[in-house]
Image (cartoon, rainbow, N blue to C red):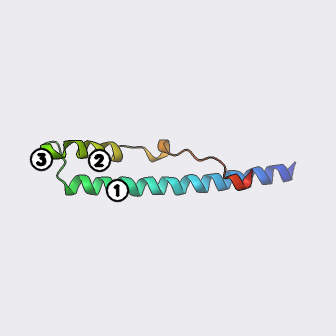
């Protein structure tokens, strides 16, 4: 029984680590979107009409929730 628990605990730990790595990647992408949004003056009052589509993409990017965007499955080497 202990051996089963130890194996499942190890797998859960690895999955959690992969999830945290994925969250870090998404958070760095969001930071890049915020930087582009700011650099291109995408605020609604100063947004150039030619950049409207680009600015909306940046808004969609940085309004993502990293916790909800991550779907991590057990790595194949465990299965």
> Which one is closest to the eye, mark 2 or mark 1?
2
Q: Position of residue 41 (x, y in %)?
A: 16, 52
Find numbered disc 2 in the image and state the secondary structure of the residue it sits on: helix
Calculate the distance from the C-alpha at mark 3 to the C-alpha at mark 1.
Answer: 20 Å
Residue beneath the point at 39% across and 55% down: 29
Residue beneath the point at 27% across and 57% down: 35
Rendered image quadrant of residue 60: top left
Find numbered disc 1 in the image and state the secondary structure of the residue it sits on: helix
Residue beneath the point at 53% across and 57% down: 21
Q: Position of residue 36 (x, y in %)?
A: 26, 55
- Dots 2, 1 in contact, CB < 8 A: no
Tell me which label, 2 or 1, sits earlier in the chain: 1
Calculate the distance from the C-alpha at mark 2 to the C-alpha at mark 1.
Answer: 10 Å
Q: Is residue 66 left or right of residue 10?
A: left
Badge 1, how many Cα within 10 Å: few under 14, some, many 20+? some
Using the image, tell me which numbered label, if any, was put on residue 12.
none
Q: Is residue 48 left or right of residue 24?
A: left
Calculate the distance from the C-alpha at mark 2 to the C-alpha at mark 3.
Answer: 15 Å
Tell me which label, 2 or 3, sits earlier in the chain: 3
Badge 3, how many Cα within 10 Å: few under 14, some, many 20+? few
- Dots 2, 3 in contact, CB < 8 A: no
Q: Position of residue 52 (x, y in %)?
A: 19, 42
Residue beneath the point at 85% across and 52% down: 2
Using the image, tell me which numbered label, if any, was put on residue 31.
1
Residue extending farthest to the right is 1
Using the image, tell me which numbered label, if any, was put on residue 58.
2
Find numbered disc 3 in the image and state the secondary structure of the residue it sits on: loop
Using the image, tell me which numbered label, if any, was put on residue 46.
3
């Amino acid at each position: 029984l202990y051996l089963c628990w130890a194996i499942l605990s190890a797998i859960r730990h690895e999955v959690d680590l992969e999830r945290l790595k994925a969250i870090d990647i998404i958070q760095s992408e969001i930071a890049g979107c915020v930087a582009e949004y700011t650099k291109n003056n995408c605020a609604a009052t100063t947004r150039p009409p030619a950049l409207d589509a680009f600015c909306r993409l940046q808004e969609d990017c940085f309004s993502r929730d990293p916790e909800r965007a991550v779907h991590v499955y057990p790595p194949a080497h465990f299965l």
